[in-house]
Image (cartoon, rainbow, N blue to C red):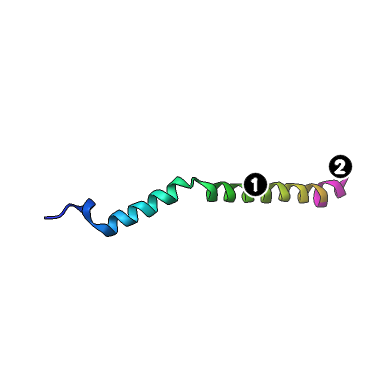
Amino acid sequence: MTHPDDDPVSVDAQRKIDDIVAQGPGGAFAVAGVATVIVIGMFVLFYLLVYLPRGAVQ
């Protein structure tokens, strides 16, 4: 009977997973950064295109 850890395919797959995890969460930070830029851009566009042209409302 063989142990699952002795399987060369699972050992190779585990090494690949360890390499990916060791690189860190760079993709998550990139997605969060892009989302933040989009939200800030929407705010600026709203301010420039909607809020300022209305002027003072009495």
Mark 2 lies on a secondary structure that is: loop
Relative placement, left or right, of 44 versus 34 is: right
Q: Residues within 10 Å of mark 2 (few under 14, many from 20)?
A: few
- Residue extending furthest toward the top: 58
Identify which residue is drawn at 34% across, 56% down.
13
Q: Which residues are magenta?
A: 49-56
| Residue pointed to by mark 1 | 36
Which amino acid, mark 1?
A: Thr
Relative placement, left or right, of 52 versus 43 is: right
Q: Quadrant of residue 10?
A: bottom left
Residue 1 horizontal/vertical position (percent)? 11, 55
Q: Quadrant of residue 9?
A: bottom left
The residue nearer to you, when weighing 47 against 6, is 6
The residue nearer to you, when weighing 52 against 12, is 12
The residue nearer to you, when weighing 29 against 48, is 29
| Residue pointed to by mark 2 | 57
Residue 5 horizontal/vertical position (percent)? 23, 51
Indicate which disc residue 4 carries.
none
Which amino acid, mark 2?
A: Val
Identify which residue is drawn at 86% across, 42% down.
57
